[in-house]
């Protein structure tokens, strides 16, 4: 951030010159005639940061609402796996497609594995591991998934593997549909 550079310059003493404080979507530029004082720097920084924070919060709320509406609009069972922790977020499609009441399924990958038909578990595990280890970005699997009433649904599961700069998996997101 330019704001950080300007404050760092002032922290070491007055260097003079044009000062620009910028945190999108706000930018303040000025040419001080006298060396700035700490209270001026702090006051300007607080105003810029407060405006930027409000913008970030509004954008976050809009994106969160957009995601929730899209998740509700689809009949697919969408999911989001934190690869490091095994924690899984599941959309409302699990309720409509498979009959599970809200909060019934534990938010962990082990819960998912237990609901895969016993005859499909090893192959699904091997194919998922292959997708992860080979560096793939997406995968498609077919298997049987247990409904709340004990019957099994034939599933097509499509996923996308989110990787970090070193190509290690960090998240896996996907959708299951019948």
Image: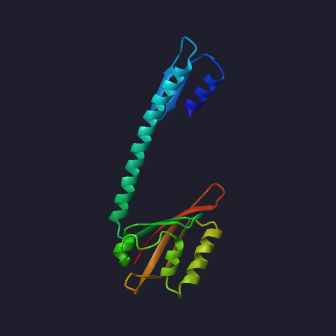
User: Which quarter of the image is occupied by the N terminus?
Assistant: top right
Place residue 149 in its image quadrant: bottom left
Indicate the colouring scheme. Answer: rainbow
Residue extending farthest top: 33
Q: Which is nearer the eye, 118 or 173?
A: 118
Which residue is rendered at x = 42% and y = 39% of the image?
Answer: 55
Place residue 74 in its image quadrant: bottom left
Q: Which is nearer the eye, 63 or 147?
A: 147
Which residue is rendered at x = 49% and y = 75% of the image?
Answer: 112
Residue 96 image position (x, y, % from top left): 34, 74
Which residue is rendered at x = 40% and y = 51% of the image?
Answer: 63
> What count of labels does the image hold?
0
Which residue is rendered at x = 63% and y = 24% of the image?
Answer: 11
Q: In this view, does 52 lie to the left or right of 9?
A: left
Q: Which is nearer the eye, 39 or 81?
A: 39
Residue 177 image position (x, y, % from top left): 41, 75
In the displayed structure, 42 sits above or below 76; it is above
User: Which quarter of the image is occupied by the C terminus?
Assistant: bottom left
In the displayed structure, 106 sits above or below 30; it is below
Residue 24 image position (x, y, % from top left): 47, 35
Residue 48 image position (x, y, % from top left): 47, 30
Q: Is residue 59 left or right of residue 39?
A: left
């Amino acid at each position: 951030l330019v704001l950080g550079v300007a404050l760092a310059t002032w922290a070491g003493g007055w260097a003079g010159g044009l000062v620009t404080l910028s945190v999108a979507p706000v930018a303040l530029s000025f040419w001080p005639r006298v060396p700035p004082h700490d209270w001026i720097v702090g006051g300007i920084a607080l105003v810029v940061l407060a405006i930027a924070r409000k913008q970030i919060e509004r954008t976050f709320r809009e994106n969160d609402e957009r995601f929730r509406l899209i998740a509700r609009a689809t009949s697919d069972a969408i999911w989001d796996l934190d690869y490091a922790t095994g924690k899984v977020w599941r959309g409302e499609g699990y309720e409509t497609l498979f009959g599970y009441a809200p909060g019934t399924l534990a938010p962990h990958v082990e819960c998912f594995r237990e609901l895969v038909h016993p005859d499909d578990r090893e192959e699904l595990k091997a194919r998922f591991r292959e997708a992860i280890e080979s560096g793939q970005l997406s995968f498609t699997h077919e298997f049987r998934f247990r409904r709340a009433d004990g019957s099994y649904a034939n599933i097509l599961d499509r996923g996308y593997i989110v990787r970090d700069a070193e190509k290690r998996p960090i998240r896996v997101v996907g959708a299951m549909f019948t």
